[in-house]
Amino acid sequence: MRTFMRRALTPLAVLLLAACGGDDDKVGTKTAEQAQPSTRTLAATLQAEDGFGTLGRAATNAGLRDVLDGVGPYTLFAPADAAFTTSGSAVDFTDEAMRAESAALLRGHIVPGALTRQDITAAIAGDPDGEVQMRTVANTLLTFSRDGEAIMVAAESGARGRLTGEERIATNGVMQPVDGLLVGPAAPPAA
């Protein structure tokens, strides 16, 4: 019951804590008030930022670029190009044959709503266990916690990453860079 209540109340808690967040919730990065607002959508932001080309091409391959250009709001936990090479995966998410895997990858890195680092930090600080779960558009859970000053994110599969760099505020959401893939490629079929 406690897990169910936490999952049910997490989105509400994030919204309430975001409204109450103050300057004490800084995490060594720009807060929403300090971040430069953009006139670009998430798709345009992804395309314009250096180091996110693989994810941008995967979004196009998956047919989800229009979603990232849409109304939103969404928070995209965006793995940098390095995350694709260090994951040990030889999967080319930009290959047309990998369209379904590309879509699964994107959906597993997107949560509804525009969440800044300040919002996430406040939600973690407000939880007695020091962790918060958010449901992705793929209907999987991402668990956020702190490790010192770093905000860690873990997927149900056990994949982990750390929020890195500066968040990018877009017209239809927030792009949060992450240093790992939270959704890996599907295992190849057994021969």
Image: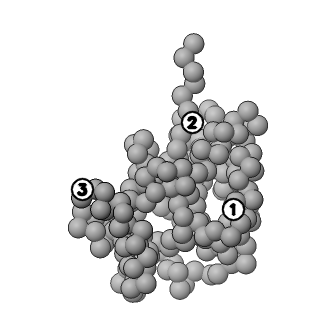
Residue at 43% x, 60% y is 134
In percent of width and height, residue 61 lies at 74, 45
> Label 1 is placed on what type of residue?
Leu
Q: Quadrant of residue 173?
A: bottom right
SS label for mark 2: loop
**Marks 3/1: CA distance?**
35 Å
In percent of width and height, residue 137 lies at 55, 55
Residue at 47% x, 71% y is 117
Q: Would residue 145 be found to the left or right of residue 69 on screen?
A: left
SS label for mark 1: helix
Q: First in sequence: mark 3 or mark 1?
A: 3
In percent of width and height, residue 49 lies at 69, 63
Is there any visible trace of residue 189 in the rendered image? yes
Q: Quadrant of residue 144?
A: bottom left
Using the image as rendered, state which of residue 126 and residue 54 is in the foreground. Answer: 126
Residue to which mark 3 is pinned: 1
Residue to which mark 1 is pinned: 68
Q: Which mark is residue 95?
A: none
Using the image as rendered, state which of residue 135 and residue 58 is in the foreground. Answer: 135
Residue to which mark 2 is pinned: 185
Q: Is residue 81 above or below residue 48?
A: above
> Label 3 is placed on what type of residue?
Met
